[in-house]
Image (cartoon, grey):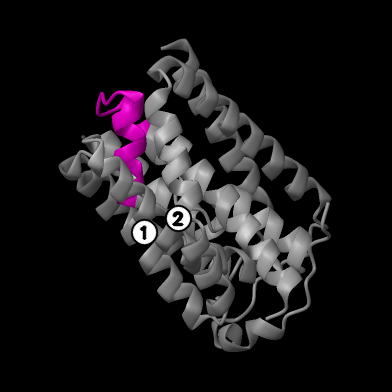
Amino acid sequence: MDRGRTLKLATIGTAAGIFSGLFGVGGGSVIVPLLVLWLGYGPREATGTSLAAIVFIAAFAAGTQGAYGNVHVLDAVLIGVPAVGGVLIGTWLQQRMPTRSISLLFAVVLVASAVELLVR
Amino acid sequence: MIAAIAIGVCAGIVAGLLGVGGGVLFVPGLVIFLGLGQHQAEATSLLAIVPVAIVGTVKQDDYGNVRRGDAIVMGLLSIVGAAAGVALANALSGTVLRVGFALLMVLVAVQLVRKAMSEPRDSSPPCPPHEGASRRNRPNAVDNA
């Protein structure tokens, strides 16, 4: 692996880590576009590789948050276990259908949730 | 509680489709339906992401979509950033974090819409399942807008 490539990966990892720790997300919304734009990944490879990197990133960030005493393990199980079923459906769907309409639907859900968070 | 389970399933589907951890839905779900504060919701979301990302990775690896070396380099080198992000989150107030998170959601939404709009409608035709293993060589049909 050449140096420039490693440097790009390190930059993506660090940026995703900061995002992940700051906002409690995996960092995929940083990783996927950067893999496509900087490293020429195809969309499916970018999402697959992003998920693999997120395993490490979320584990590190969750461990650090655990030290602050902020992690509610039972709530994580309640929301995380159904999500494991969801991710099986999502990856299956991704191999078989155009993602355009799903992306648009997801965008609507995001904006609605953002509004809900802001007006609380 | 049923709403929390439903949002969990949705977050998982989104994670599989978009290659994210699902946190962008976990966090509002935990705040809105389970009544957690922003800090607790973010921390709890991170833990919930781990099994989702593991299962998603295994499935994507079956389809030949995971570049393992790159993922490990990014993952291991994220540790400093992750620790810094967590420290920063805990230094900020819940309100600041919540507003920041809402802005993040809108940004992701804009990014998604732009990407979807720049994609030709037929860029990702449904493929018969038996072609799954050869997907690695599929030409990249989405332009990098």
Asked whether the viewer can see residue A85, the reply is no
Marked residue chain, label 2: B
- Residue at image coords 32%, 39%: B43
| SS for dot 1 | helix
- Up the image or down, A98 lies above or below A115; here it is below
- Residue at image coords 74%, 49%: B116
Report if the CB atoms under discs 2 and 1 are less than 8 Å apart: no
Q: Which residue is mark 2?
A: B79
Q: Which residue is mark 1?
A: B52
- Residue at image coords 44%, 56%: A57
Crowding at dot 1, Cα within 10 Å, few <14 / some 14-19 / many 20+, comes out as many
Q: Earlier in the sequence, mark 2 or mark 1?
A: 1
| SS for dot 2 | helix
Q: Is residue B35 magenta?
A: yes
- Up the image or down, A32 lies above or below A104; here it is below
Residue A18 x %, y %: 52, 43
